[in-house]
Image (tube, grey):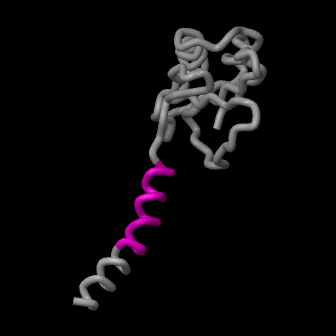
Amino acid sequence: MQTISTARRFATLLSAPLLLMATACASTDVGSGGQREPVVRDGFSGSCDGKAAAAYVGQTLSEQVAGQARQAAGASGVRIIRPGMAVTMDYRAGRLNLEVDDEGRIIKASCG
């Protein structure tokens, strides 16, 4: 009887970190203020022209503006980067990065 209880505790201790890791890796499209982020998940393939998307610098971010910037750049994906946000360093040729300020205005458009 004691062995089953010990085995159950051991299994719980092993599964808890896995559950936490899976939860931490789950993606979300909800940005600050509970609004949905205009994010396209693709971006691994294709190309991107950051100079074409630079025309959107200064505009307030919306789903429509992000889509227009993506189309102008010829990108297959968009990543929104907010102030203080952790950003991975992976390079995706077809991804447009739109950096925004605290007011939600686009301050930089780049590819990668």
Examine the rendered structure and indicate whether residue 86 appears above or below residue 41: below
Give the image quarter of residue 83. top right
What residue occupies the far left of the structure in this picture?
Answer: 1
Instruction: Answer whether residue 37 is magenta in the image.
Output: no
Give left or right: position of 47 versus 26: right
Q: Is residue 6 above or below residue 22?
A: below
Work out whether residue 76 can be spotted.
no
Picture quadrant where residue 87 is located:
top right
Disc tally is: 0
Q: Residue at x 64, y 38 (%)?
A: 112
Q: What secondary structure predominates along the stretch shown in magenta?
A: helix
Give the image location of residue 71, x and y in percent: 54, 16
Give how far across and how far down residue 34 sits, in percent. 54, 23
Relative vertical location of residue 98 with respect to residue 17 in this rendering, above or below:
above
In front of the other: 44 or 15? 15
Q: Which x, y percent locates residue 63?
A: 53, 14
Q: Give the residue drawn at x 71%, y 27%.
A: 99
Q: Can residue 52 be seen in this view?
A: yes
Residue under the image location 70 percent in, 12 percent down? 56
* Rendered location of residue 92, percent (x, y): 57, 41
Boundaries of the magenta span: 12-25
